[in-house]
Image (spheres, rainbow, N blue to C red):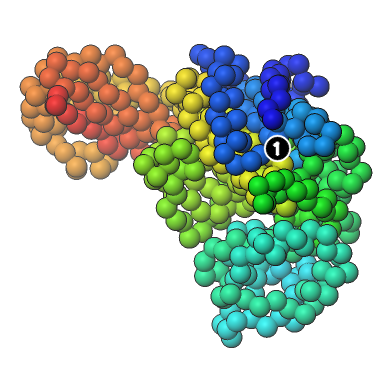
Amino acid sequence: MRYKAILLAALALAAPLPAFAQTAQAPAATDPASLDSEISTILTKWMAENHIPGMVFGLVKDGRLAYVKGEGVQDLAAKRPVTPDTLFRIASMTKAFTALSVLKLRDEGRLALDDPADRHVPELRGWTYPTSDSPRITVRDLLTHSAGFVTDDPWGDRQQVLSQTAFTALLKAGVPFTRAPEMRHEYANLGYAILGRVIANITKAPYRSFVETRLLTPLGMTASGFDVLAHPKDKRAIGYRWENDAWAEEPTMKDGAFNAMGGLEVSATDYAKWLAFVVSAWPPRDGADPGPVKRGTVRQVIRGVNNAAVFRRPATGGKDQCPGTVSYGMGWRIIGDCDYGTVLAHGGGYPGYGSHVMVLPEYGAALFALTNRTYAGPSQPVWDVAALLRAKGVLEKRVEPVSADLASFYSAAQTVWAAGTIVALQGRVAMNFPMDRTAANWAKVLAETRAKSGACDTTAPILAEGAMSGTFTWKCEKGRIEGTVLLAPTKPITLQALEFAFEGKN
């Protein structure tokens, strides 16, 4: 049964997001609300194909929950519809909170990422490593899933209710390794459970206390937390599994020793505040830095990536789309995508729940979906909606600002082209420039290239790749010029390379 979807703009939701989330960006050409029917079609089709009782989808953009959509029910018995305030377990998407907590403790000088983990968790000190030359597991190894543990989703997910006493006993007994540490990435919930113990031992308080008081509360995530049994039942999405052509309710797992790997429960309204904070870390800039964690620290979650692999989009037709790369940072999978650039993504699979999130720093946006069916990771509809929003102009890539130096040298490049000589660059080039091509040869190459291209419109702006490099494209009578301006790391700034490459019409 499909229930009426709920569509709310962020300004109608609770309180505004904190000031740090308000990043300046021109409004998109298209309002996501105008695409409601198309978005709903993507979501409901996937839900029907995968037997999903309820789902909420959200788009975070310009520092706010720009669009949110609830479909289906949060409780099959009571038939309560999913709303933006329905609470879902987000499973492994909790790891991003754990990783940032570790980085916050690092900022406070209370640990180092290359500390041996057994410095903070004494139960690890008696472990037998797989080889005599195995390095001791570090905090960084745990963050990046490179500690040598076997992947453990089926087992790890059911450890949520494990008591701290039982977890201590498990650690004291030691665990088997699948390989020596630091050899490759292998996703292991056990590693993040150990990070929860690292945080607890350093702060001398439960792991959840640090996340709730140092991250959730400052972000205004007042409905979210780890003690799910204390959350109002009529606000919670009840978790179900699909078996024997019917839904069966999963048992509600209480907060336990593995909560750092997947125990958090959030609403779409609250989770949007977290994502607005994460997205606000980009781009680097001057000015106030009022978040619960510094912007520069948030950006570090993409570091430490290891053992990159080929990435295929989970979107419809993803196998036929351009491949990218994927590796693991700290609490996030880091994807290099041909269209979206750097993407931070993660799924959440749990008994009774499935979720997915993708953060697009270069677009200033994030998309997520939360469901209440076991392991129903909604990556496909999230990526499909992202493609729709990008095609319709809702998602627009941020433009790198052109620095004064780059603009000045681009102006000089335009003069060089018009004059057919490099006289305009006199006294402004790096020492390598005349060595790489003489002034006489520059005049020859410019004459030949201009003859090939015919008249060109040189008014197109330069596209910055950073403060000291950029590219430009000029439309010409016989084709186009693809140009590059590359400045040198000198003071005063000089030009180290200039290129005018002609491409003829096909």
Q: Is residue 336 left or right of residue 286?
A: left
| Residue named by callout 1 | 53
- Tell me where residue 446 sits by quadrant: top left
Residue 491 position (above or below residue 15): below
Q: Quadrant of residue 118?
A: bottom right
Tell me residue 454's x, y (percent): 11, 17
Asked if one can make out residue 470 in the rendered structure from this viewpoint, the answer is yes
Q: Position of residue 470 (x, y in %)?
A: 36, 30
- Expressed as whole percent of the image width and height from the top left, the position of residue 320 reads 36, 42
Secondary structure at badge 1 equals: loop
Residue 212 placement, left or right of 24: right
Q: Residue furthest bottom?
A: 132
Horizontal side of 446 relative to 275 (left or right) equals: left
Evaluate whether residue 492 shows in this view.
no
Comparing 1 with 220, the one in front is 1
Measuring 76% from the left and 16% from the top, which residue is drawn there?
12
The answer to whether residue 355 is left or right of residue 338 is right
Which image quadrant: the N terminus?
top right
- Which residue is located at x 63 percent, y 46 percent? 376
Q: Percent x, y for residue 235?
A: 84, 34
Residue at 52% x, 36% y is 383
Q: Residue at x 74, y 64 (%)?
A: 194
